[in-house]
Image (cartoon, rainbow, N blue to C red):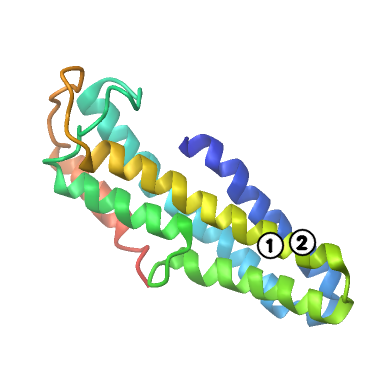
Amino acid sequence: TLACSSLSQIGFITVGVSMVDLLGEHNALAANGTVLYMLNHSIVKLVLFLTAGAIYMGAHTLDLNKLKGYGRNKPLLALCFFIGGCSLAGIPGFCGYISKTLVHESIVEYAHHSHLWYVTAAEWLFLLSGGLTTAYMIKLFVTIFIEKPTEDTPKGKSPSALSSAALILSAVALPV
């Protein structure tokens, strides 16, 4: 899911690059938002993939059906995944919010100047895609960290001290 979500996030970046071109000399929002989005995406995915790696090292599976409730007693993993998920979804208070908002506002600016119906449609698709990002991150979080474990759920252990340090150091950058 995390790997496939990169396609969606790259789509958001592509929209930002398009707005840089379409807005011409009035592209400050789009340019700043796009560059910030690329930076944020790399840091957010670092946190999420480190968390997924820690889960894999403890559970030896990435099958979501087998991971139900795996992280219930692993607060560090839950916190890091929550921070990464909120950032990826663009929740206020996390780094993804600023970049997504700047790119979104550049679409609104272009729609205001161009008066083209399909730009408004692109804005709605942008917002819908952001909502879908939130939905699949909630699904992952609830499945791994909130649902009750099943008999198939591996017990696993918490990440090592070194892995925990890497998770903490990378996740601390995501809140604004």
Q: Is residue 9 above or below residue 69?
A: below
Q: Could you tell me how far apart the alpha carbons at marks 1 and 2 are, in whole angstroms?
A: 5 Å
Q: Is residue 115 above or below residue 37?
A: below
Q: Residue 158, which numbered label?
A: none
**Which residue bears the numbered disc 1?**
124
Disc 1 crowd rating (10 Å Cα; few below 14, some 14-19, many 20+) is: some
Quarter residue 164 falls in? top left
Furthest toward the top, the residue is 152
Q: Is residue 150 above or below residue 5?
A: above
SS for tag 2?
Answer: helix
Residue depicted at x 80% and y 74%:
111
Residue depicted at x 46% and y 53%:
134
Query: Residue 145 vs residue 64: left or right?
Result: left
Q: Tell which of 69 and 9 is nearer to you.
A: 69
Q: Tell which of 134 and 158 is nearer to you.
A: 134
Residue depicted at x 39% and y 40%:
49
**Which residue bears the numbered disc 2?**
121
For the C terminus, give its image quadrant: bottom left
Q: Tell which of 74 and 20 is nearer to you.
A: 74
Disc 2 crowd rating (10 Å Cα; few below 14, some 14-19, many 20+) is: few
| Residue 127: x %, y % from top left | 61, 61
Q: Are marks 1 and 2 in contact (CB under 8 Å)?
A: yes
Task: Name the residue type under label 1.
Answer: Trp
| Residue 105: x %, y % from top left | 66, 75
Quarter residue 33 falls in? bottom right
SS for tag 1?
Answer: helix
| Residue 118: x %, y % from top left | 84, 62
Task: Name the residue type under label 2.
Answer: Ala
| Residue 86: x %, y % from top left | 39, 58
Query: Residue 22 vs residue 33: left or right?
Result: right
Residue depicted at x 27% and y 51%:
80
Query: Residue 43 vs residue 175: left or right?
Result: right
